[in-house]
Structure formats: structure tokens, C-alpha cells
Image: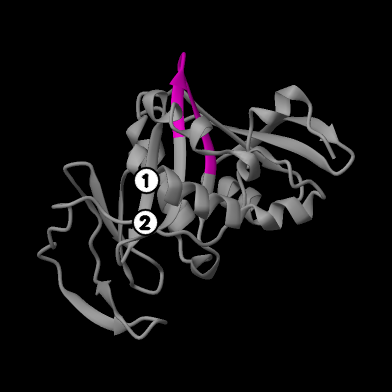
Amino acid sequence: MRHSGKARDRGVLAGYVAGGGTQREGMQRRSNASVFMKRGTRGQPLERCSLFSHWITDISRSCTRDGIAMIIEKAGPEDAQEILNLQKTAYQSEGQLYNDFNLPPLVENLEKIRPDFDGQLFLKAVIEGEIVGSVRAYMRGDTCYIGRLTVRHDLQDQGIGTKLLEEVEGHFGEAKRYELFTGHRSEKALHIYEKRGYRICRTEPIHNDLTLVYLEKTPAKP
């Protein structure tokens, strides 16, 4: 199946999977909150945390639902390849779901993604030095446009996608409106967005197997 030219510039905002990456040097200061350890699936210890989540110079320290320590921080061009690896693995299931392996997240390459770091905010979720989730966003007028929310497959249902969404919204706290979109069959993504207060505002058919569903959210007035 082929996308319209309009669709090639977009990415369905669902899909969760694997990826790798490294944290920036000097960004792993420990919190004073209680920390203990658990064995990971590779036989290596995973840092676990207890009841802390706060900003430390552009770093958000948090936990998955299983209590595994996680850092969410800004990503840079040096993370581009790891984010692409994560994204392309994740969106394979979307390609199957929509019978279309030309979805923009599946064909994006370094040449296409690198310029986006100049005009968009990229966030990455990091556990044990590996990128396990990412999202990107930018402002146009008074609207924040959010895209490519991705979480590693084996860490789904741990609240990582929700936390990434929460953090990117926080970075654009001045926005009067947030907008994102996904495919009509991406039930998990639709559920996450609706739980965060997003509501469907319009749809756009792309081809017989794919309709984009646009959702918006207007922050509550203080």
C-alpha cells in the first residue's frame, strides 16, 4: 500500500518495542530516596526505587509500575540511531496491523531524523543505560504537536508511555492545546491518550486499511 504525500510526513503514534542507547555522562546522580535492587532478565541488577519522581536539571527520575528505576531526559542527535532502532522495531506490529510497511516511522532514517532535533523536543526513557522509550513534540502557535510515542515491547503496561506523555506535556506547559494522532486500530494507544484526557477531534482516511485518528486536549484553566 502507498501513502498519500500528506501521510508520509506523519507517524502513527502507537507501537511499543525494543531499542538501545546510553545515558549522557554525568547524568546519573542518585536520589536521597530509598533505593534497592532486583535481578533483571539478563542476570544483571536493576535499580529499584521507592516513591520518588522529580526534576533534576532536565532529568525526571521515576519508576515503572514494577518499581524499576527510570530516567526521562532530553535526547540529542547522538541518540538518533538508538531511537530509530527502537522505533522501527516497535512499528513492525503497526505495519502488520495496517498492512502497510511504508509507514513513516518504518522508513525514517538518520538523514530525515537529525534535522528534527533542531526544531523539536525529543525525550527518552532510560533504564540501566538503555533507551526503552521515546517521544517528540514541537509548538506551532498555541498548539503542542506530539508524535512517535514508543515503548519497548517487554516493558509495555509499566506506565512508561504515560510518563513520557506527561513529561512532554510538562515541557510545553504554555500550550493552550495538545494534539496527537494514531491509527484507528491502535487500541492501546487510544486507551493511553483517552486516560490522559485526549478526545477525538477528527479522522482522516489514508487507505483502505488505515484511518488516522486525531485527538486533542485542552489543559484545565488554573
Q: In this view, does 130 lie to the left or right of 34?
A: right
Residue at figure coordinates x 65%, y 48% from the top left: 190
Residue found at the far right of this picture? 208
Q: Position of residue 70 (x, y in %)?
A: 31, 62
Residue at figure coordinates x 22%, y 41% from the top left: 58
**Cβ atoms at labels 2 and 1 below 8 Å apart:** yes
Residue for badge 1: 79
Q: Where is residue 181 in the image (x, y as percent from the top left)?
A: 63, 36
Secondary structure character of the magenta stretch overall? strand
**Relative depth, front residue between 124 and 8:** 8
Q: Which amino acid does label 1 sit on?
A: Asp
Residue at figure coordinates x 64%, y 56% from the top left: 188
Q: Is mark 2 on a helix, strand or loop?
A: loop
For residue 39, above or below residue 135? below
Q: Is residue 75 visible?
A: no
For residue 28, above or below residue 171? below
Q: Residues within 10 Å of mark 1 (few under 14, many from 20)?
A: some
Q: Position of residue 79 (x, y in %)?
A: 37, 45
Q: Where is residue 55 in the image (x, y as percent from the top left)?
A: 21, 47
- Residue at mark 2 to residue at mark 1: CA–CA distance: 7 Å
Q: In which quarter of the image is the N terminus?
A: top right
The region drawn magenta spans 137-148
Residue for badge 2: 21
Q: Is mark 1 on a helix, strand or loop?
A: helix
Q: What residue type is labelled 2?
A: Gly
User: Residue 214 is drawn in which quadrant?
Assistant: top right
